[in-house]
Amino acid sequence: MTVAGDREVTGVEGRSPARVRNELVAEVVDVLQQSNAMRNTAGSDLVLRMLGEELGAPVELERSGMLRTELLQLVERCAGFPDGLSVLVRCLTYVEQQSAAVTALRRLVDEWEAVDFYEGADLHPLRPALLEMRSRAALMAMARRASRSRTQELPVWCDTAWAVFLRLAGDNAAANELPVSMAFLSLAADQLMEDGKAEAAEELRRWNRKQALARGLEDRMAEWQHTGVALPPPSLVPAYLMIQFEPDGVDTDRYFLSHWRQSDAEGWHPVPGEPVHLHRDELPSEVERLVEQTEERWSDLRQPVVLEFILPWELLGEPVEWWNKESDSTSPTPLVLDYTVLLRSFERLRKASWHRPWHNKWRRLKEQPANSSAYRNRPGSSHFHLERELKEDEQAVCLVLSEPPGGDSPTSRQEFEAGLRAGIPAMIWHRGDCSDPAFREAVADIVQDRGLGSLLERTERWRREALAVGPEGWDNHVGRHLAILLDDPERRPGPPGTDHAPVQR
């Protein structure tokens, strides 16, 4: 029995804290016994070496020929370190990647931490009802509400309300708020009531009431039940789906597609997805699948969504904005109908020596848009003089290209790289012919003299005009062929401050 403040916390129904802990240890060992790495000496030695390095203390198995006994000792040893079981699973992941054993262990580590948060309480009375709740969209919506939008993503192994409850246990809540997992449990009970499962709902509420009473949280529980489903007003900060195409490096027709989802309105915390290795012809269909999957994850999101494509040189000519959604239907629609779509430079993300001027030019565009200007490159002009003039002109933050990039023309490549080296964050071009009079007219509107604060909005207006013409005529409208690169150095894959786009293999 433990004490919280001046109140005793028991919270145990049936199983003592010691039994709860021992049974969890046994479950962890059960899974480790199914691990390919831990069943052979070479694999287990590798895991143990990495484990010892991360824990800062050597970890060895006493080889007795009885694997279960050896693994029991290993788990007990790890449990003696703060986050020791999490480190064990992480080291096993290095060797086995996303194996069934790793997924099962992640759920058990979440349960271990939840039991610790609830000070040895028996959580199993909650399992039957929570295991039946499996709607991914509903689970994500409840997690966002319970955390007051601080939880933006759930790991893939959180596929039931039981797994989500365990994951949320111990998540930070403000001093005057109900713990996130208890708020989630309250929402789960409400959902069960709506589904006509009153007995299961009452089981969750009874457990929650006991915890609230034991922890002195009765007032917070009552307040949550009165106002807990209220959400903050919709954020004006967009959510971003960033999609990166990295050249294979060997096969010129293959790419590594990586992606990151960012929906945290309070900060930049992009969540990486699983990378895939694809032929160039497969990229549009994979993007379509990824967008649909992201929409399912974000079904309750109330923010606008921006798609950003991080493209290498050879794909800059791809009309990614006009790739299809719903292509298996009788009336597919282009991405640009539903999203703001931006291009970014893969090469610039990777080349840290170009980043200082990039930051400087971006600050000018962001902080002084009215004093920013566009530079229209002249056909046949020297790329050296172009770069010199862009660097000398502090107000120049946008480059209108004289040739479309992405092709075999050395002139277009030199022009584009001059803009990157000068730190120009915005570039505009016509994907077919930059000398087209209709393009010059559109550019005159987009980069008009009063500044570049509405650069994106004006580009989108031309695209909307093309959409209004419809599929039968939009190929003849300049808005169908406008491309805009708008590269924000403060918004990159990975955590703030990384100099390179991470490689996911």
Image: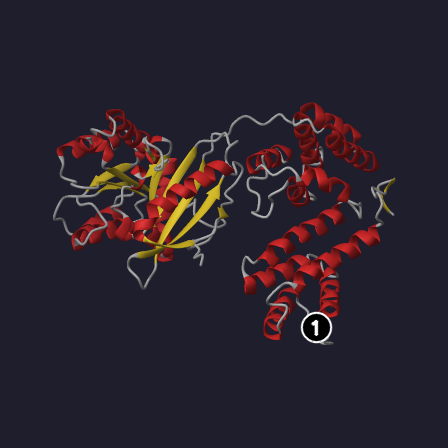
Residue underneath mark 1: 61
Residue 52: x and y, percent?
65, 69
250 with respect to 435 (left or right)? right
Residue nearer the viewer, 96 or 66: 66
Residue that protrudes farthest toward the top in the picture: 226
Location of the C terminus (image quadrant): bottom left
Q: Amino acid at mark 1?
A: Leu
Residue 31: x and y, percent?
67, 59
Vertical relation: 381 (above or below) 76? above
Please tell me how crowded label 1 is: few (under 14), some (14-19), or many (20+) other residues with Cα within 10 Å. some
| Colouring style | secondary structure
Q: Secondary structure at mark 1?
A: loop
Residue nearer the viewer, 54 or 30: 30
Residue at horizontal 61%, vertical 34%? 142
- Examine the image and state in which quarter residue 395 appears: top left
Residue 181: x and y, percent?
69, 39
104 with respect to 432 (left or right)? right
